[in-house]
Each structure stands twice: as C-alpha cells, then as structure tokens.
Amino acid sequence: MKKSVLVADTSKINLEILEEILDPFYQVIACSDPQEIEKQAKLHKPDLILIEIHLGEVSGYEVNRVLKSDSKTRAIPVIFITAADQPEIEEKALEEGAVDFLTKPLRPTLVLARIKTHLLLADRSHLLEEQVAEKTREVLETRLDIIQILGKAAEFKDNETGSHVHRIGLYSEALARGYGFEPENCGLIRHAAPMHDIGKIGIPDSVLLKPGKLNELEWQIMQTHTTIGKDILENQTSTLLQAARIIAYQHHEKWDGSGYPSKLKGDDIHIFARIVALVDVFDALSSKRPYKEPWPLEKTLQLIKAERGIQFDPHVTDIFFENLNEILNIQKMNEDIFV
Ligand SMILES: [Fe+2]
Ligand SMILES: [Fe+2]
C-alpha cells in the first residue's frame, strides 16, 4: 500500500507541481486552504506533511504548531518548503520542529529522496516506540507477577491458598470502583491488596501454624505481621509498593479504634486498608481451610452487617452490600483449588 503525503500550499501551480512529482509513488492529499490543513491531517492521517511556509495570512509555522499540539497529528513528520537562499528561514524551520526543509525551485529527485528518507526514519522510530512500549509492558507484568507470588508465598505459609490473595485483589478493586475511585487507583489497590499479609513470612511457624488458641505472647507475636509487612515494604518509591505497605500495616485496624497495631480510628485508617480489612474477613470466613469449613453465606453477611461502624467503615460496608452480586461472582469464578 502506498504511503500518503499531505501537501499544503496556497499556490495551485505549486500544488500541481508537487502532485506531479509525488503521484507515481505516494497517495497525495493536496490542500490549498491553510484553514483546512489541520482537518485534512486528522482525517487522512498522512505519513508525512509538506507545508509551504508562506501561506498568505497564516504562516506554515503556525499550522505546524497546531499540528504539533494535537496528539493525533503530533507524530507526523513535517517538511517545510521555503523560497531559495533564505538561511534564517531554513534555520527557523528546523527550530519549529520540522524534520527538514526543501527550497524552491523544487527538484523532483531531491524532493523524492528527502521524503523517502524521512518516511524511513519515521518507520524506524515507530518500530522503536513499539519495542519500548512492549518492553515496558513486560517489565510491568513481571513486577505484578512477582508481587502476586510474594503475596501467595505469605498465604501458603499460613495454610491459606493462593486463590485467597487473588480474590482479595479483585474484591478490593470492585469496592474501590463502587467507592468512586479513579480507574488508576482501582488498579493500584487490586495489585497491592494481595500483599496484605506479606509480614507473615516473618512469623515463626510455631505461632503461625499452631492448631489451638494462641496464648497472650503468641498473639502479640502474631500481630507483628503488620509491622513486619510495613518494614519489608519500607522505603519503596513505586506507588504500588507504597500502597501495599499501607495495606500491610493497617489492614487489622478497626473503624472503632480497637484494632492493631496502632489503634487507628475511622478516617485515620487509609481507605485502601479499610477496604481490604472488610474483604479479608469476608473471604476468610466464607472459604474452606484445612482447619475449618466455610461459614454459610448468610452467617458471614450477618457478621459483616453487625460489624458495620464497629470493625468496618460503615460506608465501605454499604458499598460491599451494594456490590454483593459482583463480589459473589468473583468468589465463584476464583474458587480455591485443593490438591
Ligand atoms: Fe493479616
Ligand atoms: Fe488474608
């Protein structure tokens, strides 16, 4: 398929000359009205634009600035056409962001050679951009995978299943959406929430896996999984790990101030942690574990309702019930796999 070139000049004769030169090799879009150039560029998305600098009342520079300010046309290479022997204009043309300039009278071989070069360069730069975007995607995916794995590692140590942390991410995202979070923050909590119990890595098995009730000292040790989690995730610059740190630190705080480790109250608890606190309890109660059967749904919901405004943020609790169908759907689609 032929590449397309938009040529803009108020002189019909010049346009005809350019069309004659380019026509055998490119699909040419000729534009003699300076007010139409932007519209034509957006409509046809040409691979390259040739603009005469002197366009009557409007200058080619101004048109170029408009094209460069719009994301739809910004990347299209622009070549200016100038009158001969005007070095200062040529210099300005390049300063204005044109990739090149051509001087009149136009020599067909030179015009074609310049266009070919810049189309090749543009192709290469697109390819590079795609490769960079692909690599960035890969890095991001790897980072998210590692985060999921870390969350799973902590849960496995605690007799939980990997699906638990995955569900916690999805439930949290659903509530964040219901709460009116921006999509970016919904994604953030989804990926950060699975790390809520990362600190359990630092709890001795004798405490973590003790079958019976914990004594006072063991309970104190168990509670430190929040501060250990905070310490593990300390000094991280990525927003994702900072969110994970807040969640790991505060997910056992309670709305009425009776939680741990800091006895934070109400809005002093970060909203991410208020959301995770609720969905973590919901999932723990409604899932089967080696030491317990799942609670019936009705009983689990009753407990959550009863803890509205006590353990759980009342507004988050309301959002949970408003989105219960979605929550139950996530649960159904992400059941535990026991081997
Ligand atoms: Fe926890
Ligand atoms: Fe959990």
Image: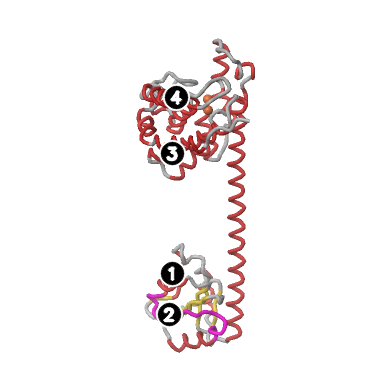
Instruction: Label 4: state its secondary structure.
Output: loop
Mark on residue 31? Answer: 2
Q: Mark 4 or mark 3: which is in front?
A: 4
> 219 or 75, which lies in front?
219
In the image, the segment drawn in magenta is 21-36
Instruction: Where is residue 161? Give x, y as percent.
Output: 58, 30
Query: Of marks 1 and 2, which one's residue comes earlier in the chain?
Result: 2
Rendered residue at 50%/85% (across/down): 19
**Count of residue discs:** 4
Residue 34 in the magenta stretch? The answer is yes
Q: Quadrant of the C terminus?
A: top right
**Distance of label 3 from label 2 (alpha carbons):** 51 Å
Look at label 3 and name its amino acid. Ala
Residue receiving disc 4 = 296
Crowd tier of the residue under label 1, counting other residues whose Cα lies within 10 Å: few below 14, some 14–19, many 20 or above:
few
Query: Of marks 3 and 1, which one's residue comes earlier in the chain?
Result: 1
| Label 2 residue near ligand 2, CB within 8 Å | no
Query: Of marks 3 and 2, which one's residue comes earlier in the chain?
Result: 2
Residue receiving disc 3 = 174
Q: As drawn, is 191 to the left or to the right of 318?
A: right
| Label 4 residue near ligand 2, CB within 8 Å | no
**Distance of label 4 from label 2 (alpha carbons):** 71 Å
Task: Look at the numbered discs 4 and 3 and tell me whether their residues touch, using CB distance below 8 Å.
Answer: no
